[in-house]
Image (cartoon, rainbow, N blue to C red):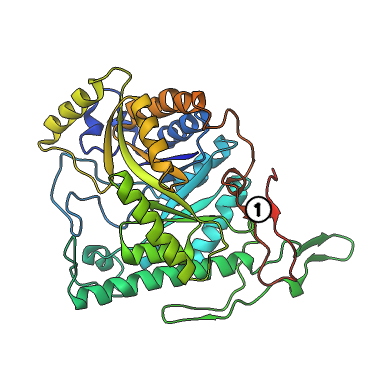
Amino acid sequence: MHLAVALDGAGWHPAAWREPGARAGELFSAGYWADLVQEAERGLLDFVTIEDGLGPQSSHPTEPDDRTDQVRGRLDAVLVAARVAPLTRHIGVVPTVVATHTEPFHISKAIATLDYVSSGRAGLRVQVSARSDQAAHFGRRTVPRIRPGGPHPPEELDVLTGLFDEAADHVEVVRRLWDSWEDDAEIRDVATGRFIDRDKLHYIDFQGRYFRVKGPSITPRPPQGQPVVSALGHGGLAYRLIARSADIGYVTPHDTGQARATVEEIRAEQDAAGRRDEPLHLFGDLVVFLDDEPGAAAARRDRLDGLAGAPYTSDAKVFTGTPAGLADLLLEWRGAGLTGFRLRPAAVGHDLPAITRGLVPELRRRGVFRSAYEATTLRGLLGLARPANRYAAAHPARRDHRS
């Protein structure tokens, strides 16, 4: 079983920062994030994702709010990942990138650099922004107000379709730029004075509806060849993006039947995209309140809800209970076709150690989780081969266990 955690501030419950062990005064410090990722690595997790956005957090799904009783503000996820990566040795680091307002050339070299800094443990979580307030930060386009939920009227659906198509093109450009240097393009021959073989740097010449990018990149091909691309999806358009562009899709079923139906829908989209034979992991997302004693997690959730002034709800299923109970649920959902899980700790200070020191040993006792890291790259941990360079002469892909 593959297992990841999604890190966001003090946790996914809006009142988590008010918990005694929340370290609210350290949320914008490098040491805080280093401690979280190192704890995740002690639990032998595959990777962490780091949340980000192009506007302050909001209790409203499509527009800002004026609340002052919840965490507002974030550090840049890519820069946080680059800071913590050298302090770890095995765990993958996957920052969130908003494709809607960022240039793929910039993102390609940022994630390639992260792959070098981490010695092959980088990925990205591509995100779409459909919020007009975030578009106003950049001033290059306007995004009409999109009503939360669905179904959407035709004019809103057209906007959303365009944003997801743009994100797919964004990923395609990023991937091509990663391949624009062949693996052996650097010669570094002092005697002849040749540092690179110019014939092994390639123009990508991408021309699409949203981007025109000449290439090549200014950063050599990353250690993994292709760092891992992931995306979160709740339905049709996002499922299509996952099927077309991702190595990992995060999905949010609320029961086993939904999990099975979601897997079947994305696999059908994968076939339609011509990727039937390519590996694509599907991870179930869950928010977790974990305690060893039955009832303790529910009491803690009730206390946090009281501080927040409302019951906590989420796009993902909220699990409240013991590590053994969560292990039962994960195994049941795995039977529906999910290949891994991304857990969102409700209160990081409590629930992240509950995952690494409670859930992980329970899964290990059941024989479904590793007892040691078996690879040195994120692709290796996920069982993904190191892909051949699309611009080089064809050669067999090989399993990547390089240091």
Q: Which residue is mark 1?
A: 223
Q: Is residue 377 above or below residue 126?
A: above
For image coordinates 64% across by 69% down, the residue present is: 180
- The answer to whether residue 367 shows anywhere in this view is yes
In the rendered view of the protein, which quadrant contains the C terminus?
A: top right
- Judged left or right of residue 251, residue 362 is right
Quarter holding residue 91: top right
- The answer to whether residue 252 shows anywhere in this view is no
Residue 240 appears at what percent x and percent y?
39, 66
For image coordinates 22% across by 63% down, the residue present is: 133
Query: What type is the residue that disc 1 sits on?
Result: Pro
Residue that sits furthest to the top in the current view = 293
Q: Is residue 356 above or below residue 184?
A: above
Front in this rendered view, residue 80 or 385: 385
Residue that sits furthest to the right in the current view = 191
Q: Is residue 9 above or below residue 115?
A: above
Residue 208 appears at what percent x and percent y?
46, 81
For image coordinates 49% across by 64% down, the residue present is: 106
Residue 98 appears at what percent x and percent y?
38, 60
Front in this rendered view, residue 158 or 219: 158
How many other residues sit within 10 Å of disc 1, few (<14), some (14-19) or many (≥20)? Answer: many
Q: Is residue 15 above or below residue 316?
A: above
Quarter holding residue 381: top right
- Judged left or right of residue 98, residue 156 is left
Local secondary structure at mark 1: loop
For image coordinates 10% across by 36% down, the residue present is: 309
